[in-house]
Amino acid sequence: MNRAYTYMLRCGDGSLYTGWTNDLEQRIRAHSAGHGGKYTRSHLPVELIWYEPCADKSAAMRREAAIKRMSRAEKLALIQSANATGADGVT
């Protein structure tokens, strides 16, 4: 089983970025160095605020798509809910 992750970043301007990866630490380093997604390059610095382990790439991509369809308020509620329950993926 290949582990994958769906994650959210808070950008320097307060916006939220959602993505997926199979190497979370490396991907966050890439975003922070300006080598991540095109959006985050112009919205540095970034901070990992939420992540969720997924079974595989396909599951991570589906979860990313679902989160991207959420409103900002729903995304913030997801983050807050994970913080309140101490669930995996809260930083």
Image: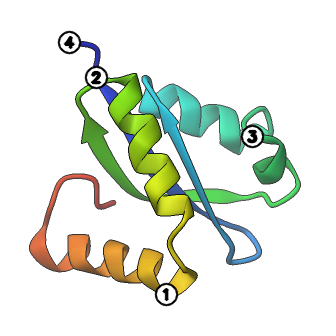
Where is residue 32? Give x, y as percent. 68, 44
Residue bearing the label numbered 1:
73
Describe the element under mark 3 as helix, strand or loop: loop
Quadrant in the picture for residue 86: bottom left
- Residue at coordinates 54% horizontally, 80% vertically from top-left? 71
Q: Residue furthest top?
A: 1
**Nearer-the-camera pick, 28 or 77:** 77
Q: Which mark is residue 3?
A: 2
The C terminus - image quarter = bottom left
Where is residue 79? Give x, y as percent. 35, 73
- Within 10 Å of disc 3 (Cα), the crowding (few <14, some 14-19, many 20+) is some
The disc, 3 or 2, on the residue closer to the chain's N-terminal end is 2
Quadrant in the picture for residue 6: top left
Q: CA distance from mark 1 to mark 4?
A: 33 Å
- Residue at coordinates 46% horizontally, 32% vertically from top-left? 25
| Amino acid type, mark 3 | Gly
Left/right placement of residue 69 relative to residue 13 reads left
| Amino acid type, mark 4 | Met
> Is there a contact, CB below 8 Å, between mark 3 and mark 1?
no
Q: Nearer the viewer, mark 3 or mark 4?
A: 4
| Amino acid type, mark 1 | Ala
Describe the element under mark 1 as helix, strand or loop: helix
Describe the element under mark 4 as helix, strand or loop: loop
The disc, 1 or 2, on the residue closer to the chain's N-terminal end is 2
Q: Which mark is residue 1?
A: 4
Describe the element under mark 2 as helix, strand or loop: loop
Q: CA distance from mark 1 to mark 2?
A: 28 Å
Where is residue 48? Give x, y as percent. 49, 55
